[in-house]
Image (spheres, rainbow, N blue to C red):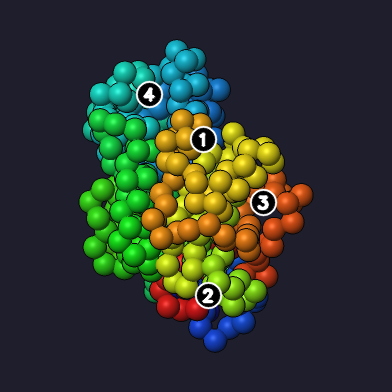
Amino acid sequence: MSADALAIDVGSGTQDVLVFTPGQNLENCPKLVVPSRTQIVGRQIRQATGAGKNIFLHGEVMGGGACGLALRQHLKAGLKAYATPRAALTFHDSLAQVEAMGVILTEQPPADAISVWLGDIDPAAFHQALAAFGMSLPQRWAVAVQDHGFSPDASNRLLRFRLWEKFVLSGGDLRSLVYDAEIPEVFTRMRAVRTVLPDAVLADTGTAALLGVIADPLVRPRLSEGVLAVNIGNSHTLAAAIRGGRVYGLFEQHTGVLDLSALQALITRFQRAELQNEEVFAQGGHGAALHPQMGAGWEFVVVTGPRRSLAKPLGWYEAAPYGDMMLTGCFGLLAGLGLL
């Protein structure tokens, strides 16, 4: 069986996968929720650490998180870590900062080091998984990764919200952030996926999640009045005020610093259009970007994401487009492609 598209939403904990075939009931399309590449790479590094072996990291820039933590623990154990400059950008946009961690930059794999390949997408793994069920790789790939943007000299949290602010002030059209042609140079993580998959369509995970939320059949009719969409992921929480096809404001915080009261306080200030970028950033988050025309209101709140249970007592509507919350980002990618 040949699929038309493989949609992959890459998170910090899982990569959520939908094998899409036109004309097939979406509920019957094959789906996978498997560990993300950063979890896999982190496990490989920890195995080398446990064996007392040095490591050589090569490949592409990818998401950090779990693999970054494993690398720091490896170095703390007194073992050596070598990396190509391209792969080393996974851990900081400044190679000088990576070297300061103790990583040795080299293009040549040392003879005594275990080789670990870095990259957000492993096409060979998907070929193997699909082949086991008599399926071939699709003609089209659509991938979402969280790309903060390349910022070697300043916090990429600041850059991420300068980019989000530019997006909000320039019209807030989510579909404009789904890249089927040229990807802006600032988005190095998306461009790294394009290196592995030259024809792939790319988007930020935030973009994919929001497009997926508004694909929910109970959310779509409310777009004319405006909805407040909240995606509570394993690592990040993103909220956006959306009316029609336009985003009027958004904010992003690390999920790990939120409890019920903190989340409710952020949402209340956001609904009133009072939330400031500086206060979110000062709390350790990425920031907030609000259009001057956003205004107060936004009473209909819809929530999705693997950590959505955090908001359960608030009674928000839990979106599950096409019956599967974990694939919200995948459905968003397909919507961005015009396939839904």
Spot occupied by residue 326 in the image (x, y as percentages of width and height) = 62, 59
Extreme bottom residue here? 23
The amino acid type of the residue labelled 1 equals Ala
Asked if labels 3 and 1 touch by Cβ distance under 8 angstroms, the answer is no
1 or 3: tag closer to the N-terminus:
1
For label 2, the crowd category at 10 Å Cα-Cα, with few meaning under 14, some 14 to 19 and many 20 or more, is: few
**Residue 215's spot in the image, x, y percent?**
55, 72
Q: Are marks 2 and 3 in contact (CB under 8 Å)?
A: no
- Tally the numbered discs: 4
Mark 1 or 2, nearer chain start: 1
* Secondary element type, mark 4: strand
Depth order, front residue of 218/48: 218
In this view, the residue in front, 270 or 154, is 270
Which amino acid type is shown beneath numbered disc 2?
A: Ser
Rendered residue at 54%/29% (across/down): 47
SS category of the residue bearing label 3: helix
Q: Mark on residue 83?
A: none
- Mark 4 crowd level (few <14, some 14–19, many ≥20, 10 Å Cα): many
User: Disc 4 vs disc 2: which is toward the camera?
Assistant: 2
Which residue has dot 1 on it? 66
Q: Is residue 35 visible?
A: no
Q: Residue at x 37, y 24 (%)?
A: 81
The first of marks 1 and 4 along the sequence is 1
| Badge 3: residue crowd in 10 Å (few <14, some 14–19, many ≥20) | some
Q: Position of residue 210 (x, y in %)?
A: 50, 62
Report the residue marked by disc 2: 224
Q: Earlier in the sequence, mark 2 or mark 3?
A: 2
Residue type, mark 4 in image: Ala
Q: Which mark is residue 308?
A: 3
